Image (tube, rainbow, N blue to C red):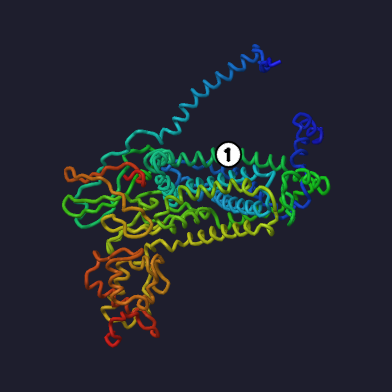
Amino acid sequence: MSEQTPPPPRPVAPLTRRSFLFKLGIGMNVVAASLIAVPVVGFVLSAAFSRKAYQAWIPLGKIDDFPEGQTRLATYRNPFTRPWDGFTANLPCWVRRIEGEQFQVFAINCAHLGCPVRWFPESGLFMCPCHGGVYYEDGSHASGPPPRGLFEYEYKVKKGALMVKGGEVPTLSESV
Amino acid sequence: MSMKTIGQWFDARLHLAQLFEATAGHKIPASSASWWYVFGSATLTCFILQLATGVCLALVYVPSPDQAYQTLEYLNYEQPAGWFLRALHYWGSNFMVTLMTIHMIQVFMFGAYKYPRELTWVMGCILFLGTLGAAFTGQVMRFDQDAYWGLGIGVSIMGRVPLLGQEMVHGLIGGPILSAEALSRFFSLHVFVIPGLLIAVIGVHLRLVLTKGINDYPVAGKGVDPATYDQEYEELLEREGIRFFPDGIDKDVLFTSFVLLAIFLCAILLGPKGPNGPADPTFIHTAPRPDFFFLSLFAVLALLPPYMETSVILYVLPLFVVALFLIPFIAGTGEKHWSKRPGAAAGVILTMTSLITLAWLGTYSPWSPHMNAWSGVPTPPAMVKGLSPLQLQGAALVQSKQCRNCHSLDGLGGQRGPDLTNVATRLTENQLIRQILQGDGNMPAYGDHLKPYEVTALVSFLSARHPANQPAARNSAVPASRIP
C-alpha cells in the first residue's frame, strides 16, 4: 500500500548511428569554430589589449628654435605609424620655453573633448574652438568645461635638441 | 514563347506569386491606409538609395588617410557625376534620419508599440541606433577636418570610461593615434557591419509587421486589452480589411516619390557636403562641427556643468536609450490615442523641442570663443568717436588682448561672455578692474598679461560704455559729486 512506485524512467532516445553522427558533428563543429574564432577575435581585439607601450622619445628640433619666453607650435611624425597614414601621423604640440632648458610641452588636444587648442600670445591664453575651454600659458585650466589643464609631455634636452616622450593620443584615462 | 509563358515557367519553380500574395497582399485595416503611415516605407526607400549610392561611391573611394581626401576631391571634380552621387548619399542620409525620426514619433503617438507589437518597436529602436551609427561613421568617411576632430571627440568620450578607457580607445581607433586603422575600422563598420545589421533587422521588423499586422488607426477611448486585442484585430480585418497591395499602398508610393524628388532636388541644387580641408592634424586653425544629427549632442557637451559631464555621457544618455527600448514593456497596454495620453504628447514635445533647440544652438555655438574676432571684427565706429587718447588705447586693447573673442560690442564678436556695449551700467570701475585682473565665473584672470597702464586704458574705455541717457554704475561709498 505504502509501496511507492518509482517515477517512470524518462524515455531515452536510443543512440542510433544517425544521432551519434549528428552529435559528433555538433561537437566537431564547436571545436572547429573555436579554433577559427579565437584568432579572429584576437585579430579584432588585438589593438585594444595590446600590451605594447606606445611611448617613445621624439625629437622636436633644436632648443634654439624656441625663443625664451615664447610658446610655439612644433610638429613631429608619430613614432608608431603605418606607411599609409599620410599626414594623420604628423602631430602638432605647443612648446613653451620658459628659460634656459626649462620647457613645457603641451598636447594640442583640449582636455575636454580633444579639439585642437590655439595659442594667443597677446593675452597669454590657449583657447579651444569647440566648446570654449581656455587655459593659461602654463597649461592650467582658466575657464570653460575642461576637467583639468592641458596634457603635458615629459621632455628632455639632449645635445641641444628638445625631445618629448609621446606616441599616443592623450585622453583622460591616458594623458600623453 | 510569350512573356507570360516565361513568367509562368519561373513561377512554377520559384512560387513568387504565392510569396507576393502572402506578403505584399496581406490585409490591413482600411483606416491604416493613412497619410500618417507613410514614413516607415519612406525611410526604407532612403535606405535602399543609400545602399545603391554607397556601393557606387565605394568604387572610387579609398579608405586610407593618405588617399581618402584625394579620392573625395576626385569624386567631386573628375569622376563623371561623382559630385552628384556624393550629394545623393549625403542628402539621402539627412532624409533617412529625419524620416526615421518622424516615423518613430508617429508610431509612439499612435500607440503602435503597444501589445502585440512590442518586438516591432524594439527592432525599430535597433534600426534607430544603427542608422545613427551609419550617420556617424559616414561623417568619418568624409575624411576632412570635421571628420578627424569629430572622431577625436568620440575618442575623448571613450577615454572617460573608467578602468577600460584606454583599451576602448585603442579598440575604437585600432592603435595609438587617429590614423590609418581608425579610418579602416570606421569604413568596415560603415559599409559592412552596420548595413548588414540594418538589412537583417529590417527583415525582422517587416516580418513582424506581417505576423502581428499593421497598427489599426487609434480611436480615443478604445484601449488595448491583451486578452481581447488579437480577436478584435482579426474581426477588424474581416470587417474592413483591405489588401496592402494593391489597395492600401497608394499613399506610400506617392509619398516615396516626393521623398526621392526632394532628395534629387537637394542633391542637384545644394550639392555634396565638403570635404572641408584635409584631415591634417597640424592644421589647427579649424573649428570642427558635426553633421546635424549630432549637433544637439555637441551642444549638450558644451552646456553641461563640468562636474556632471562624464556621468551624463557615460550613464544618463545610455539610460535614455534603455528607456526607449523599454517603452512597450512599461506602457504596453491601455489607451492608444494621443488625446488620451497627454504625458506621451508632452514627452515628445519636450524631447523634440530640446533636441531642436540644442541643435540650433550647436550651429552657431555661442559657447565657443570667436577665434578671429579680435583681429577680424571691427570696433563699432560710434563707440570710438570722440574718445580721449587713453580710452582709444583701451579700445585697441579690447581687440589686441582678444577680449572680442568672447565679448561682443554691439552684437559683433564672441558670445561666450556678456556683451560689453553697456558694461559700464553693470560694473563700477573697481569692479571692472577686479574682474579683468582676477577673472571670475567663466572669465580667465588677465593679471599676468596686462601692465598697469593697460588696465587703466581698458577700464577707461569700458567705463565709458553706457548709453547717453543712462549713467554708469557707481560705488555707493563714493559720493556722486566725485564721479568724473
Drawn side of residue B87 relative to residue A131, left or right: right
**Residue A55 relative to residue A68: left or right:** right
Above/below status of B444 relative to B57 = below
Location of residue A86 (image quadrant): top left
Residue found 70% across the figure and 53% down from its top: B335
For the question of whether residue B77 can be seen, the reply is no
Please name the residue shown 20% across and 47% down the image.
A62
Furthest toward the right, the residue is B239
Q: Position of residue A166 (x, y in %)?
A: 29, 42
What residue is rendered at 40% in x and 56% in y? B306
Callout count:
1
**Residue with the mark numbered 1:** B197
Q: Quadrant of the N terminus of chain A?
A: top right
Badge 1, how many Cα within 10 Å: few under 14, some, many 20+? some
- For this rendering, which residue is in front, B3 or A126? A126
x then y, percent, for residue B415: 41, 66
* Chain for numbered disc 1: B
Of B345 and B120, nearer the camera is: B345
Which residue is most to the top?
Answer: A17
- Image quadrant holding the C terminus of chain A, namely top left
The image position of residue B8, as x and y in percent, is: 80, 33
Helix or strand or loop: what does disc 1 sit on?
helix
Left or right, B106 with respect to B83, comes to: right
Q: Which of the two residues, B361 or B113, is positioned nearer the viewer here?
A: B113
Q: Amino acid at mark 1?
A: Leu
Q: Is residue A34 above or below residue B265?
A: above
Where residue B104 appears, x then y in whole percent? 63, 51
> Can you name the residue that lies furthest to the bottom here?
B481
Asked whether the viewer can see residue B165, the reply is yes
At 28% from the left and 58% from the top, the residue drawn is: A136
